Image: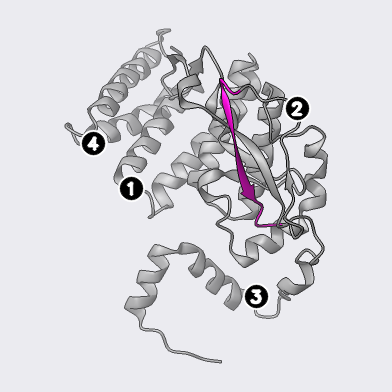
Amino acid sequence: VVISVPVDRALEVFREAPEIAMLLIRSFAEPDRPRPAISEVEPPPEAAGDTGEVIRVPGEVDENFFFLDTATCPVDGVRFEFVRVRTRAVRPAARDSDFHVRYSSVDPTRYSVIVCPVCGYAAYLDDFESLDDEARVRLWSDREARAPFLARPLNGPRSVEDGVTVLDLAIRCYGLRNAGPAREAVLYHRRAWVERERGQAQAEAEWLRRAREAYRGAFEQDSRLTDDSALRAAYLVGDLSIRLDEPHEGAPWLETVIRRADAKSQSGLIRMSRDRLHDARVALRGGDRAAS
């Protein structure tokens, strides 16, 4: 079937949903590639979730810190409970220059991703159920590969190691969703924070490097980013470059933030960029202030 679409309208659609452009390009580039039919890979009608039962959080939950919520997995139809952190339980203690917050109580970032306890699908709550058909097919087909991550329940209170597992699952799942560099950058960055908390400098550097490249890609390629998000990404490219002992890479990005940011609405980001630009210049002169 051949249809005609006005070029202006097509470009507008591609700007709003770049994944449509990618699907179109792939269709022309690989016309003979077989496409799996969704009916061939969907879970059978008797799969968990069709009974209306809810998988409960195992063990006791401290209601001073958590409350229970429920979600339905869009991959396998399972309905399950998961814990959420009470706002009043959050006690920030310090913040690093790359926005990593240290908490004196429960760390809410450890619970920002939820995980289906049956198939291991992991995503942020705000887009947990936002799956297109092709992504669902890929995630369903990948469920056996995710099974080893589910040795411990992940829908209740989480240890640091559980937090690592959850982030690794989320990175895998968002990769299968073709989520793009902006989402990848945040996940890589949070993975680096965990290694920082564990004192693993080499592992932290590896994840920071991946995060920096993803932030760079988001700034340069993702037309969906707002101006604020783009400048935040630019700042983080600069900050992470300094943390990776590459101040010559970071300084131009920080200068970009200072030059482009609005002095009224983004004064905090401008101040932080100036501080880190000073750190970069000190490091370039052989100083030692850069890793603060």
Label 1 crowd (10 A; few <14 / some 14-19 / many >=20)? few
Q: Observer-nearest residue: 161 or 216? A: 161
Q: Which residue is mark 3?
A: 30
Q: Magenta segment: does it hold 64?
A: yes
Q: Nearer the viewer, mark 1 or mark 3?
A: 1
Mark pair 2, 3: CA separation: 50 Å
Of callouts 2 and 3, the N-terminal one: 3
Mark pair 4, 3: CA separation: 43 Å
In the rendered image, is residue 133 in sight?
A: yes
Q: Amino acid at mark 3?
A: Glu
Q: Nearer the viewer, mark 4 or mark 3?
A: 4
Residue lying at 82% horizontally and 40% vertically, measured from the top left: 148
Q: Secondary structure at mark 3?
A: loop
Q: Is residue 49 above or below residue 92?
A: below
Q: Observer-nearest residue: 169 or 260? A: 169
| Residue positioned most to the bottom | 1
Q: Amino acid at mark 2?
A: Gly
Q: Which residue is mark 1?
A: 226
| Residue positioned most to the left | 264
Q: Which mark is residue 261?
A: 4
Position in image of residue 194 (x %, y %) = 61, 23
Q: Secondary structure at mark 2?
A: loop
Q: Amino acid at mark 4?
A: Ala
| 159 left or right of 12 in image | right
Of callouts 4 and 3, the N-terminal one: 3
Q: Observer-nearest residue: 208 or 35? A: 35
Q: Which residues are magenta?
A: 63-75
* Image quarter hosting the C terminus: top left
Of callouts 1 and 3, the N-terminal one: 3
| 121 left or right of 129 in image | right
Q: Quadrant of residue 264?
A: top left
**Residue contact at pointers 4 and 3, CB within 8 angstroms:** no
